[in-house]
Amino acid sequence: MGLVKYNNLSISSISDVSAIDGSMVLIKTITASSDSTIDFVDGTDDVVLDNTYPIYLFKFMSVHGSIDFRHLTFQGNVASGSGYNETMTSSTFYAQHDEAGTATALTYEADYDQAQGTAFQAIVQGAGADNDQASSGELWLFNPSSTTFVTHFFAIGNCSTDDNKIRSLHTSGYFNLTGAIDEIQFKMSGGNIDAGTFKLYGIKDS
Amino acid sequence: MAIVKLNDRGVRNVSTFGSVGAGSMVFIKKLTASTSGTLDFVDGTSDVVLDDTYKEYIFTFKDIHGSATGQFGFQGNAASGSGFNETMTTTNFRVFQNEAGTDSELAYVADEDQAQGTGLTLIAQTIDTDNDSNLVGYLHLFNPSSTTFVKHFISRIGVMKSGDSAANTFAAGYFNTTSAIDEIQFKFNSGNIDAGDICLYGIK
């Protein structure tokens, strides 16, 4: 093969070079529009949620529910499993401050943790449904494809509450199983997700 | 100008594209434990970068499994220093609930912080040794190359705690030195790191 020389303009139109991408890779964005659930299912609609990445990071922004004082929640489904009902043990605590500046709190929240439960796990608590109220935060999921270890998760979910407070809920725990989790579903504890953006990223380890 | 056609190997040796964003989180190094006493990230060794190239570094922990019921922690070594024994002041609080649902807590852990200490900074609760037990999380280290300021860190570590609890530790603090920190070591205060990965990233 003969030698071909290129000048700077030869590759000036290249816009994506996967091999030199950064380590935090956007996989999928889902925009809610009066949806009852937001589902990230490996292998569906370009979603990757397998052993491609060791760590996955969901971000949710400006999530607006249709009903006052509802919680943004999530659950997983194991590969080839049926339903979002995996066993998890979790802990929750929150910090909050009201808009009037008269009340603050930092406390363990025993109403929304789980001990070997199979319910949807709250990651935002008590979001208001006023037109300007919304929730934002992130959920880390560590090595969900592992079939050796439990699968840990962390979340921080901020919301403006129905009674006009900032509440920052910190949730952590693990799916207590050694099956691979390849589906994650988000939903409100009641009503729909009227609006909001959900993003899934993969964190590379090479 | 004539059209030049490139096949999929035509630019394989190009190492940089001036206008192509490569993202701001850059993978630097992965260490995989195998019955390891310590896992060390040393600037300039084995492709590790831990200098003024980045203002922020992130370590991630995936499926760290201990050989004993120990606590996971880290220390630093200043450039040209000797030993992982820098002076640190830290905070540590934890939250957990056990699988039985009979015990839970959110509390500051005074036994696991340091006040100008030089010991191992504990960033996790005691790991269980069940086969499915592991430790995950992240540690941010800010501007370790500074020779003007102290060097801050924040971490959040999840672990299956001894006694089958889901536990998280939130640690923060600083190396109280104006020397650059260019080496970080991770280990358990008891037993080995049997398995798991620690990755180092730089944030542009």
Image (spheres, rainbow, N blue to C red):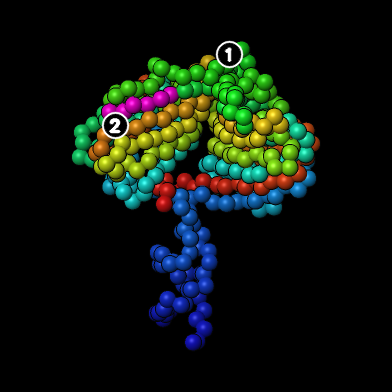
Badge 2 sits on which subunit? Answer: B
Residue in the foreground of this view, choosing between B191 and A104: A104
Give residue A119's quadrant in the image.
top right
**Magenta highlight: main SS:** strand
Q: What residue type is labelled 1?
A: Asp
Helix, strand or loop at mark 1: loop
Q: Which chain carries label 1?
A: B
| N-term-proximal mark, 2 vs 1 | 1
- In this rendering, the answer to whether B104 lies above or below B20 is above
Q: Is residue A199 left or right of residue A6?
A: right
Image check: B193 left or right of B81?
right
Residue at figure coordinates x 40%, y 47% from the top left? B202
Residue at 35 percent of width and 43 percent of height: B143
Mark 2 crowd level (few <14, some 14–19, many ≥20, 10 Å Cα): some
Kindly identify the residue that appears in the image at 55 percent across and 47 percent down: A202
Q: In the image, residue B137 lies at what x, y percent?
A: 48, 34
> Label 2 is placed on what type of residue?
Asn
Asked whether A70 or A162 is in front, the reply is: A162
**Position above or below: A110 against B53:** above
Q: Nearer the viewer, residue B31 or B180?
A: B180
- Residue segment shown in magenta: B87-92
Mark 2 and mark 1 residues within 8 Å of each other at the beta carbon: no
Q: Is residue A80 visible?
A: no
Badge count:
2
Q: Which mark is residue B176?
A: 2
Give how far across and how far down residue A44 sits, in percent: 70, 50
